[in-house]
Image (tube, coloured by chain):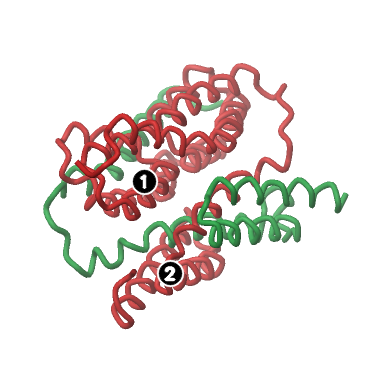
């Protein structure tokens, strides 16, 4: 076995995931507070966070329900925000697709922005990892994050608006994601993808239901693929 | 007040739908090989989705009511640069956050 072993892969994942608590804790708390404002009790807020584990989609659903949007609109818009998860799922399939079905089911449940981004960076860099080591790393990344996502949703819902929400916190999520993009810009193709996606996201921001994100993501991926096709495979 | 039946319909529906989206390729495609053209696109998922997700938030932050804020732009640019050159997401996050906090004091 050339790989680092299952246990050490797990701990490595856990360690790589922990810094994201700086984002997850305030984000989960904020969701709890907003859920409380919307009249949800702690159990209902927790139900949301356990069933969905996707902040952006949860905020969207809560907002639309408060605006008394029709149920079908609430579901469609929130799922549109989460469509990127299907792209993540496809992108991870070459790395985790050989696992037994139940492990793929668990990985799917815990597929969030952070575990995807950390996982894909790791799997593309360390090619010698076994299937079991990859799964251990992936589960490691979420085992430090997800419990706090649940716990602080409840904390937010219980404490409610008594928590002062520092305005700088709104920017924790963008900074954390941008920090993940930098190391991923390995080739000209990656940079083209990021540039086209960024410009398109601004250009198509007017589209309803967060569809601008999807249009921008598809255009970015197409740009990366086209650059790769013309000027060669990534290093 | 949100209706309780509506609320749980959304929670359960969104939960099942989200799991479906996450499971669709990982679970249903599994170890069957994907076509080369699709693989070529999927290699750029992370570097496309993440910037597209945050770019509007960076340029038009919610906290400022959508008004472009030089401090937030600088923090994002620094986080990107540190991430790119140092290849270290954690360092990029910390430096980006430091710029945001320092810039906040400096401007106000």
Helix, strand or loop status at disc 2 = helix
Q: Residue at x 13, y 57 (%)?
A: B33
The residue at which mark 2 appears reads as: A193
- Residue A66 in picture, x, y percent from top left: 56, 35
Whether A172 is drawn above or below A34: the answer is below
Q: Given the image, what chain letter belongs to the residue carrying mark 2? A: A
Q: Is residue B31 visible?
A: yes
Pointer 2 and pointer 1 on the same chain? yes
Q: Nearer the viewer, residue A120 or B61?
A: A120
Is mark 2 in CB contact (under 8 Å) with mark 1? no
Q: Which mark is first along the chain, 1 or 2?
A: 1
Outermost residue, front side:
A2
Q: Nearer the viewer, residue A112 or A6?
A: A6
Pick the quarter of the image with the N terminus of chain B: top right
- Residue A165 in picture, x, y percent from top left: 71, 33
Crowding around mark 1 (Cα neighbors within 10 Å: few <14, some 14 to 19, many 20+) is many
Query: Whole-Å distance between the Cαs marked 2 and 1?
Result: 19 Å
Q: Nearer the viewer, residue B108 or B103?
A: B103
Quadrant of the rendered image containing residue A35: top right
Whether A51 is drawn above or below B89: the answer is above
- Viewed as shown, does residue A40 lie left or right of A165? left
- Specify the label residue A119 is tagged with: 1
Give chain A's shade: red
Whether B103 is drawn above or below A151: the answer is below
- Residue B25 in picture, x, y percent from top left: 22, 49
Give chain B's shade: green
Q: Is residue A208 visible?
A: no
Helix, strand or loop status at disc 1 = helix
In front: mark 2 or mark 1?
Answer: 1
- Viewed as shown, does residue A160 lie left or right of A180? right
Q: Nearer the viewer, residue A55 or A233?
A: A233
């Amino acid at each position: 076995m050339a790989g680092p072993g299952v246990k050490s892969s797990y701990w490595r994942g856990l360690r790589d995931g922990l810094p994201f608590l700086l984002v997850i804790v305030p984000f989960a708390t904020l969701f709890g507070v907003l859920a409380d404002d919307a009249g949800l009790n702690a159990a209902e807020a927790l139900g949301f966070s356990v069933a969905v584990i996707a902040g952006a989609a949860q905020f969207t659903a809560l907002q639309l329900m408060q605006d008394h949007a029709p149920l079908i609109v609430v579901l469609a818009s929130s799922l549109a925000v989460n469509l990127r998860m299907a792209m993540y799922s496809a992108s991870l399939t070459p790395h985790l697709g050989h696992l037994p079905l139940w492990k793929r089911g668990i990985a799917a449940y815990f597929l969030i922005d952070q575990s995807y981004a950390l996982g894909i960076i790791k799997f593309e860099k360390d090619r010698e990892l076994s299937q079991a080591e990859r799964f251990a790393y992936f589960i490691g990344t979420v085992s430090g994050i997800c419990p706090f996502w649940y716990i602080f949703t409840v904390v937010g819902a219980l404490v409610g608006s008594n928590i002062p929400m520092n305005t700088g916190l709104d920017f924790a999520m963008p900074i954390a994601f941008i920090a993940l993009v930098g190391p991923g810009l390995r080739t000209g193709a990656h940079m083209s993808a990021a540039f086209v996606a960024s410009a398109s996201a601004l250009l198509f921001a007017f589209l309803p239901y967060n569809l601008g994100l999807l249009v921008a993501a598809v255009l970015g991926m197409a740009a990366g693929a086209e650059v790769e096709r013309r000027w060669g495979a990534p290093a | 007040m949100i209706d309780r039946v509506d609320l749980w319909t959304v929670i359960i529906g969104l939960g099942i739908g989200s799991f479906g989206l996450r499971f669709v390729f990982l679970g249903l495609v599994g170890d069957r090989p994907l076509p080369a053209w699709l693989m070529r696109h999927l290699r750029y998922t992370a570097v496309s989705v993440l910037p597209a997700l945050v770019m509007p938030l960076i340029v038009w932050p919610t906290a400022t009511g959508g008004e472009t804020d030089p401090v937030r732009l600088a923090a994002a640019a620094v986080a990107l640069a540190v991430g790119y050159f140092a290849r270290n997401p954690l360092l990029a996050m910390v430096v980006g956050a430091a710029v945001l906090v320092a810039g906040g004091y400096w401007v106000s």
